[in-house]
Image: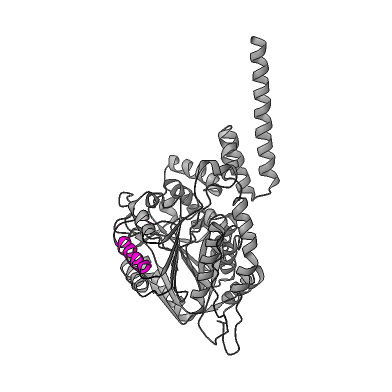
Amino acid sequence: MANLQNIIGVILAVLYWVFIAGVTIRVIALRKPVSVTLAWLLVIYILPIVGAVLYMMIGELNLGRDRASRARAMVEPYLRSLDTRIPPGSALPSSELSLAINQLLTTQVHISAQSYSRLELLRSPEEIFDRLCEDIRSARQSIRIETYIWHPGGRVDELSEALIQASERGVQVSLLIDHAGSRPFFRSPWRRKLVAAGIEVVPALPVKLIRALVHRIDLRMHRKLVVIDERVAFTGSMNMADPSCFKRKAGVGQWIDVMLRMEGQAASGLAKVFAWDWEVETGQRRLPEIDNTPVPSNHWLMVIPSGPGVGEDLIGQATLTSIYRANRSIVISTPYFVPSEAILNALCQAAQRGVRVQLLLPRRNDSVMVGWASRSYYEILLLAGVEILLFDGGLLHTKAMLMDDELALVGSVNLDIRSLQLNFELTVALTTQESCRQIGELLQSYQTSCERLTLESWQRRGRTVRSLERLMYFMSPLL
């Protein structure tokens, strides 16, 4: 019996060693960024078996066979439909920043700037819901909504009723909602009520344990997008959640968001982003047939999608490009700040060469781990001369960047590794003087509710705090 136990013990030890060695070789062979590789190796060795299993579930970018196949089939027609010709007589903004982003898009994914006839910056929940409900009530053909969180309650219920009424009068209503971000919604009476009214409600990237064997389970559909009749579109940072009744017990205050409302060719471009996501999830092709005949215009923006399948890390590349080309000022608002090593270095270098770099961050956010990870970068940034402004007026959830008052990036992407490299995200690059002025005024209004963090006060924090920050700094590539 003793010999049998010894033999079993040796066999288990060998199997364990082979399993861990195999996962380790896999981590190293994929040649991910060094910080990511080291973080995963730490998890694998500190949490035997569990760490290796976690890596197999969420360590590699894997959409699953069916989604990956649909994504590959969609690339060519999707990019071809987004490729627009800029007609004679039209003028793209002449700033180097705007031209650099346009060149990045045309080179990487063969899509270029798109025109718009009207652009509005919606800065408050009341204004956002008013415009959404107004446009939904006037819809005649189709309503497409894509969001990470759908939280029933408050004005979201009013919007849901407007969607039901639209469906009842013959408008095709399609909702693509992230499964993990909206679990309460999918179990709520509202989902059944919407489906009963003839509305298509599709969970994006469903989270099921058995599916972890075939694709990564923590990929998220993080875009915020509404398209009405293929002529009006909304995008920005706000989920389908009324701040007055969303996460009221989180202790961070109301969420602060913005949305862009646009009409014209750019709205059609956003309709095609929805069509991509809908086909990858459902297999149904609904790429809108829209007249792309060039129309002279001096109002241009750039739609920048990123995520597995197309435009991978495209928003990250646009962010890096704009940071390195900025000469005077960089202002960034983001709720979750866990930057890649490349973006951290770019921000520090910009400050060291005399660019005024300001980070607007919420003093408190709803993710404890991300909060600790974010604070682990403060001293590095302060030493480089970056200004850190802590927002006290709620959870500053707006994701916006303004470079030299000449280029603004507004959308769903957080300045963290997850958003830049994993999630399906959407950002709009604004290039006109008027649109950049509006973003500048918005960010300036946030600063009135901020306190500037000084290096001296930050260095007075205790040893326990510093130890937690160091741990989360090492783990930040995985958050």
Question: Can you tell which quarter of the image residue 169 is in?
Answer: bottom left
Write down the quadrant of residue 243 in the picture: bottom left
203 or 413: nearer the viewer: 203
Left or right: 32 in relation to 208: right
Q: Nearer the viewer, residue 456 or 390?
A: 390
Horizontal and vertical percent for residue 97? Answer: 57, 74
**Residue 127 appears in the rendering:** yes
Image coordinates for residue 233, horizontal then vertical, percent: 45, 72
Q: What residue is at 54 percent from the left and 71 percent from the top? A: 303
Seen in the picture, residue 338 relative to 138 is either above or below; the reply is above
Q: Look at the image and give the residue range highlighted in magenta.
A: 149-169
Residue furthest out toward the bottom: 89
| Residue 83 within the magenta-colored segment of the rendering | no
Q: Position of residue 253 (x, y in %)?
A: 32, 55
Can the viewer see residue 354 in this picture?
no
**Principal SS element in the magenta part?**
helix
Q: Residue at x 59, y 42 (%)?
A: 213
Q: Position of residue 458 (x, y in %)?
A: 43, 51
166 in magenta: yes
